[in-house]
Amino acid sequence: MAGLARHVNPEELIETLRDHPTHRGRSHSSRAVSHTTPYSSRYASATELSKFKIPQDGAPADVVHQLLKDELDLDGRPSLNLASFVGTFMEREAEQLMVENLSKNLSDADEYPAMMDMHARCISILAHLWGVQKGEKAIGSATTGSSEAIHLGGLAMKRRWQEKRQAEGKDASKPNILMGANAQVALEKFARYFEVEARILPVSEKSNYRLDPELVKENIDENTIGVFVILGSTYTGHYEPVEEISNILDEYEKKTGISIPIHVDAASGGFIAPFTHAKAGQKWNFELPRVKSINVSGHKFGLVYAGVGWIIWRDESYLPKHLIFELHYLGGTEESFTLNFSRPGAQIIAQYYNLIHLGFNGYRGIMENTLANARLLSRALETTGWYKCVSDIHRKKGDNKYEKGKPQYEDGDTSADYNAGLPVVAFTFTDDVKKNFPLIKQVSVSNLLRAKQYIIPNYPLPPNEDKTEILRVVVRESLSLDMIDRLVTDICSITESLMSSDQADLLGWQPTPSIEKQYSSHGLQAKNQHIARTPMHKGIHRSVC
């Protein structure tokens, strides 16, 4: 019989049991500022750095640096963070440029004209990359990321709709916007923050877990300000059919006279589709008149460190004038349409560096390589017989479904021979594994990979398909062929270990949350998600991005 156990407070335990020289009449006043190494100071054993209140007296710089560095070593390794789309590698020269310009504020346009020139050049380069049409005057801005860019794009659509309704003497109080349930949370945030009804359409296996064009047709009306279409679902990497949805909206306009615009959330795909041979499988950019604005994250496949996104409107006429602020600041006059003011300018310089340094062919080489590596990982996982891929970029163009025993397609020369999509591998246990090893939880694979320093999330598909859980790997530039070989080896080793365990259910293995996480965050651990305020089946839940 198990004995009784009591809760142990680790912080109280440490406080009670450690030496207290000061209680024994010893003074450390001189050691506070005099030490040989950071670890010979009093902060190594006798005194903690303050955590929740600013200390009365500071601590030596080398001590603070070393102790914070030691604590940060507990973080995951960015290069093995295969959960995130955000880049974790830049070349030394790009990093040097960023360090040299860390102190520059993007809002100080008059003070840093060269940086602002680079900002304008990036806008022009992206506009041409996305097919801006002759005679149009594209306009855009850098943002802190795609979330801000999506809000700006949505707000412009709302204001254009309101102005048109008011000019016609019609009610403008009930705007709505369409998006798939696979949308990243930023899209629903826009709707909630700017008081727009979010019509979140369910996704299904039939629609490849992305926005279903047929449901778009059924849910648009005169109050629809626009449709958010995603070029690269964060769940499975599928591109949503922008051209097909555009055609539906064209037909609707012919019947009703109501014009509904499209904003393309190309957070990841905006730096992939233009360069790859596969493109997006169909038209997706400003070649379609229905597409009025596009956003992208420079810090994802734009290959810049976190902190930069972009939004571009195909023509300045699609950005309502009264949303643009004329700023008179520090001696200069600038026009601005952003949610933030002060923000770092170094990422803008780094983005321009990448565009000029890599050029079109450099970006193409990197994106084709990431897709090739993602295809290899997908084939390797399916060949084991233990996993099947929900993503389909490794299958022959037009073939979207997994079939047991079907030979892998390996005859393609470039990405054009395969299904278009992001370099994402979303995979799950096969039906045979679930049947023969019912006690094995898929989350255990994620947890044991974490023990080997890989960060690979396990999470449900969007509402309506959330009974299926997937593991997901984002293949970024830094995930080389050698690392994929090692990753496949480790996944196979862990899976075999789970299968050979004596009815072991490793679901209980979970990283211990920090004191800060327990007391300062309202979030829940996976095991407690059933008591969340908003269940998963209601609206959008956060996908890993």
Image: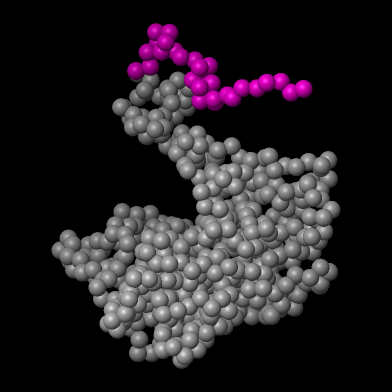
Residue 203 visible in the current orientation: yes
Check the image and report above or below for 508 versus 185: above
State how the image is colored.
one colour
Instruction: Tell me the quarter of the picture where residue 512 sits.
Output: top right
Q: Residue at x 22, y 62 (%)?
A: 111
Could you tell me residue 144's position as x and y percent? 38, 61
Instruction: Tell me the quarter of the picture where residue 105 sits.
Output: bottom left
| Residue at the limit of the structure toward the left, as seen here | 331
176 is within the stretch colored magenta? no
Instruction: Please report the bounds of the magenta region as a residue range.
Output: 1-29
Check the image and report above or below for 123 versus 298: below
Question: Residue 329 or 541: which is nearer the viewer?
Answer: 541
| Residue at the limit of the structure toward the top, as seen here | 25
- How many numbered callouts? 0
Could you tell me residue 175's position as x and y percent? 39, 72
Residue 351 visible in the current orientation: no
11 is within the stretch colored magenta? yes
Horizontal relation, residue 47 to residue 498: left or right: left
Q: Residue at x 51, y 67 (%)?
A: 200
Could you tell me residue 30's position as x and y percent? 35, 18
Instruction: Tell me the quarter of the picture where residue 123 sits.
Output: bottom left
Q: Residue at x 46, y 63 (%)?
A: 188
Could you tell me residue 87's position as x and y percent? 51, 59
Question: Residue 354 or 504: which is nearer the viewer?
Answer: 504
Check the image and report above or below for 466 versus 267: above
Q: Residue at x 49, y 69 (%)?
A: 199
Quarter of the rendering occupied by the N terminus: top right
